[in-house]
Structures are given as structure tokens and as C-alpha cells.
Image (cartoon, rainbow, N blue to C red):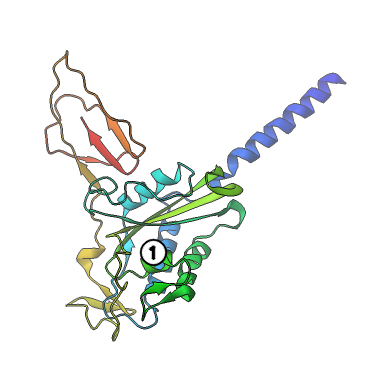
Amino acid sequence: MMSRFFTCMLALLRFCLSAGSSTPQTLPDIGDAEFIEQCVTEHNKFRSAVSPPASDMLYMTWDPDLAKTAKAWAKRCQFKHNTYLKEPGQTHPRFTSVGENIWTGSFSIFSVKEAITSWYNEVKDYSYTANSCRRVCGHYTQIVWARSYKVGCAVHFCPTVQYFSGKNAAHFICNYGPAGNYGWHPYETGAACSKCKGDQCAKNLCRNPERDKVISKYHRCFCFNLLPSAQLHLKPSDLFSFQVIPSGIQPGTDLPVMSTAFLWLF
């Protein structure tokens, strides 16, 4: 009788553990093609339909480095902005500053569409004429910032999120390059694509094949030799990974990105 009881308890424990471990696995990773398509499509949908219409709105495409930055920061499970966004070279190998939007809510209700729509809905509190907000509208203005043409997003499961009262949350972050929200109008008004300057006009957005390309799939390796007795002191960072490179790698070698947002190799 006791053995049957313990067998039942063991089965129940295994069920609970498997149920708990499966929860975060149902959220898409940054390499998920459908997730990427949803993020890009939702942003461009709103960018193409701004009112008043935009004459210079760039078509937005995916950037894997921005997505890695978003993922690295989302893993901290804090409802606050990345503190490195405005520091050149800290969050992206090319953009000197990076924009960011954050959405946190119940894991059970998360969807890319709903999260991005909630940011865009801040339009009701924004006046284009006065270029001012009645409440919060910085998420909206970043979505429709004309010169931001790259986006990378990530969603991470957090049992708790600092500065957020809910439990079992989906923590969704999108990063943008170049950053928006610098104090002037997010875009110029006028006939759609009238200020595209040679770009193609795609659904009211200025599109250029060169901008569509992935900016960088590699980070430059700054390699140097250390004497056997030398000591290398590296400052800890939440966004950087440090890896010792075997001898024989030449300075200037392109190496695949293997973790987080950025990889300095020594």
C-alpha cells in the first residue's frame, strides 16, 4: 500500500516538474522564422498607415544583433530600459545608439501582435502638430520613427519581473536602430514615399535592398598574444561574453556570433 502511495507521489512530482519546465519553452526564440516575420510585419503595418501620412518612412527589416541585445536584456527580468542603449558600441556593432520598447504581461496572453499594438495605441495620447504627449507615447513614436529601419525582438519567460507585480510573465523587448525619440517629429508629413530619394515605394514605405541586408552577422576579433605570466582582467558585464581564443587566430578575423549581444574575444 505504501509503495503504491509513493509511486503515485513520484508520478505527480514528475508531472509538476514537466509542466513547469514546459512553460517557457512555448515562447519563440529569436531565430524562429514565424516570430521574426510577425515582429517585422506588425511594425511595418503601423509604419505604413500613420496619420498624417509620412513622406520619409523607411521600411523596417530584422537585425539579429538587435535581437541578441533584446534577448540578453530580457533575461534579466527587469521592467526597465537597458542602461547601455546610448553608449556607442555597447549594444550593437554599428549603431551608435539603440532604441527600445518593453512589454510585460501574463505569459498566457502574450502575442507579438497584441504587444506591438499596445505600443502603437499610445497614438491617442500623441499630438503630431504639437509633437507632445498627454501621457506616455514614447513606445508609439519609436515604432513610427522614420529613420529607424532595423528591429530585433525577443521574448523571455520570467517567473517574476522586477518592478512588475504579475507572476509567470512574458517579457517582450524590441530594440531599434538607429534609435528614435530625440525630441523632434518622428517623421515628415507629405505624400507617401515622396522623400524616398531613389528608394522603392513599398506600401507607403521607402525600401532599399541595401538597407534590407543584415548589417553584421559577425563581430571583429581583436586578438593579441599574452605571455604565459600575463594576467588579463576583464570587467564583468551583463551583455558581454568573454572567450579565450586559441593561438593561431589572426587579428581582424571574422568570427560567428556565439552568444548574447556582443562578443569581444581575447
Q: Residue furthest bottom?
A: 191
Residue plotted at (69% across, 36% down): 15
Report the side of 53 relative to 206 (left or right).
Answer: right
Quadrant for the N terminus, please. Answer: top right
Report the side of 259 relative to 11 (left or right).
Answer: left
How many numbered discs, if any? 1
Residue plotted at (25% across, 41% down): 256
Of the pair 107 and 207, the residue shown nearer to us: 107
Quadrant for the C terminus, please. Answer: top left
Report the side of 55 relative to 110 (left or right).
Answer: left
Of the pair 240 and 131, the residue shown nearer to us: 131
Residue plotted at (29% across, 47% down): 91
- Give the image location of residue 262, x and y in percent: 28, 42
In the rendered image, which residue does mark 1 sit on?
Answer: 40
Q: Is residue 89 above or below residue 39?
A: above
Q: Residue furthest right?
A: 1
The amino acid sitting under disc 1 is Val
- Give the image location of residue 197, x and y in percent: 17, 77
**Image quadrant in which you'd find residue 241:** top left
